[in-house]
Amino acid sequence: MSIVIGTPYTKGAGYLMDGKNLNASKRHEADIRTCTHCQKVIALQEWKDAGAWCGKCMAPICDGCGVRAQTFGCEPFLQKIEQFAESQMRFQRLLKDAGMAAPVPHNPIYTGAT
């Protein structure tokens, strides 16, 4: 399969400019997208040589998700989030129905925001 960057496959794509090196001749630039299955950043020029494609999402996916998709099929990231939220709601409902108090998390989650 031959893909030309700048076609409809780049819908929703971003652009990466590596700002570590301010010298314009050594700056790394690339068209990028995120994998629809895991949100990993995919450089489209590297992806077109050795990348995977999800026929259900009709979008490029990373190599790891390509291998996983052969076994489990299409697993969009949003679907994973919805399944997790649903399982948490079911668990809270079960605790409420059983008359148990919801457990207090012992370890706070640090997001890095102050």
Image (spheres, rainbow, N blue to C red):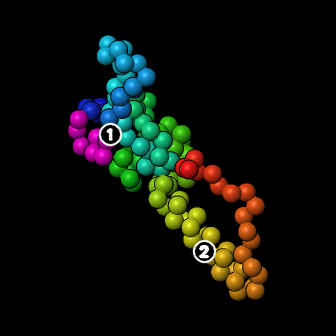
Disc 1 from disc 2: Cα separation? 35 Å
The N terminus: image quadrant: top left
- The spot of residue 31 in percent (x, y) is 32, 33
The local secondary structure at tag 1 comes to strand
Q: Is residue 26 magenta?
A: no
Residue 5, quarter of the rendered image: top left
- The spot of residue 96 in percent (x, y) is 69, 83
- The spot of residue 80 in percent (x, y) is 53, 59
Vertical side of 44 occupied by 13: above or below: below
Q: Which residue occupies the foreground of this view, 31 or 110?
A: 110
Residue 32, quarter of the rendered image: top left
Most common SS among magenta residues:
loop
Q: Which residue occupies the foreground of this view, 52 or 112?
A: 112
- The spot of residue 95 in percent (x, y) is 72, 80
Q: Residue at x 50, y 47 (%)?
A: 38
Residue 83, quarter of the rendered image: bottom right
Q: Residue at x 56, y 50 (%)?
A: 114
Q: Which residue occupies the foreground of this view, 96 or 55?
A: 96
The local secondary structure at tag 2 comes to helix
Vertical side of 22 occupied by 11: above or below: below
Q: Residues within 10 Å of mark 2 (few under 14, many from 20)?
A: few
Q: Is residue 10 magenta?
A: yes
Q: Is residue 63 visible?
A: yes
Q: Label 1 is placed on what type of residue?
A: Gly
The segment highlighted magenta reads 6-13
Q: Of all residues shown, which one is farthest toward the left?
A: 7
Q: Label 2 is placed on what type of residue?
A: Met
Q: Residue at x 28, y 40 (%)?
A: 10
- Residue at numbered disc 1: 14
Q: Residues within 10 Å of mark 1 (few under 14, many from 20)?
A: some
Name which of mark 1 and mark 2 comes first in the sequence: 1
- Residue at numbered disc 2: 89
